[in-house]
Image (cartoon, helix red, strand yellow):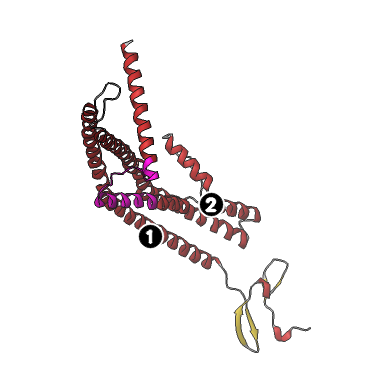
Amino acid sequence: MNMDMINMKKIVKDAGAALSRVVQLTEEKLGTSEKTELDGHFENLWERADNTKNYTEKIVRNAEAVLIPNPGNRIEDYIYEKIEKKRPSRLSNLEYLGLDMIEAGSAFGPGTAYGSALIKVGQWEQKLGQTERDFIGSAGMCFTQPLRKFLDTEMRTIIKEKNLLETKRLDLDACKNRVRKARSMLGQPSKDGVSPEVSLEQAERDLRIAQSEFDRQAEITKLLLEGVSSSHAAHLRCLHEFVDAQARFYAQCTTIMTDLQRELASSVKPGPVLRLNSEDLEPLTKTHASYDAEDSFTPVDINNYEQ
């Protein structure tokens, strides 16, 4: 029974405090009540933290869109991350392209020039795809994940403490208003059996408590805001690691494509030369030649060609 009474008193007290904050906020918006302003240094710290939050959210969102263009896959990965389960392993678009090329080359015939080339290119596209997947994984580990963790932990804590500070500020200003009101009542008859002097004494006691709680919360929030500088330094290291990973990725892609070009060039047999007035022109391709029964090139002499 006593516990029920204590809980009821707490509920009534909390409801009264909430109502007092609403009244105070309303009066501030109407311009009928003063508002305690935070110092300029604190405001600058908060502005920097707020900008950090907003721009970090944009950077993470756009970086993930570059790394994983499919929005459905991004949502799926986010859900798996939240439930702390391993992300599904999926092939990249380049790997799917490579598989289709290999399948087509096999269907057209590995012994034909086109079929053989399709198979070869498909195999190298798969290498590109695997390289891309490795880059996406390393970029997530060194860049997007640390930045998202900052948003989900440090920034969320800062916002929580800043909101609590605003609550303490409303309580403080409400107490200041009660003190002013109690002072204005001095010398007047008692109301509800309570003298103005007693009301003023209680109001001033509440004000001292509210001021102490506000100052303590302001200091806590300020320390957290000052920690954003350390977060910037950590994010700078993440940015360097991201650039290094991106540079390695593009270098690997360049090597893969250069090797592929070299292999394709080595597998192409030189075609017949088109001669015009005893001058050599470009090598013939199948579009410049006629086919014999065995699908081989037959040189065409334009000087002997009859209309």
**Residue extending furthest toward the top:** 1
Numbered mark located on residue 247 in the image? 1
270 or 91: nearer the eye? Answer: 91
Q: Would you call the spot at circle 1 few (<14 residues within 10 Å), some (14-19), or many (20 or more)?
A: few
SS label for mark 1:
helix
Residue closer to the observer: 99 or 88: 88
Q: Secondary structure at mark 2?
A: helix
Q: Quadrant of residue 223?
A: top left
Q: Position of residue 216 (x, y in %)?
A: 22, 38
Q: Which residue is located at x 24 percent, y 52 percent? A: 41
Magenta highlight range:
27-56
Amino acid at pointer 2:
Asn
Question: Residue furthest toward the right?
Answer: 307
Q: How many numbered discs sit on the rendered protein?
A: 2
Quadrant of residue 153 within the rendered picture = top left
Tell me the residue that label 2 is attached to: 93
Q: Identify the image quadrant of the N terminus.
A: top left
Q: Residue at x 23, y 28 (%)?
A: 202
Identify the residue shown where x is 32% and y is 56%: 240
Give the side of residue 127 with respect to residue 45, left or right: right
Q: Earlier in the sequence, mark 1 or mark 2?
A: 2
At horizontal 69% and vertical 74% (from top left) the residue drawn is: 289
**Left or right of 109 on screen, residue 166:** left
Say above or below: 196 vs 259.
Answer: above
The answer to if 40 sits in the magenta stretch is yes
Q: Amino acid at mark 1?
A: Ala
Predominant secondary structure, magenta span: helix
Could you say which is closer to the camera, residue 236 or residue 163?
163
Q: Position of residue 38 (x, y in %)?
A: 27, 47
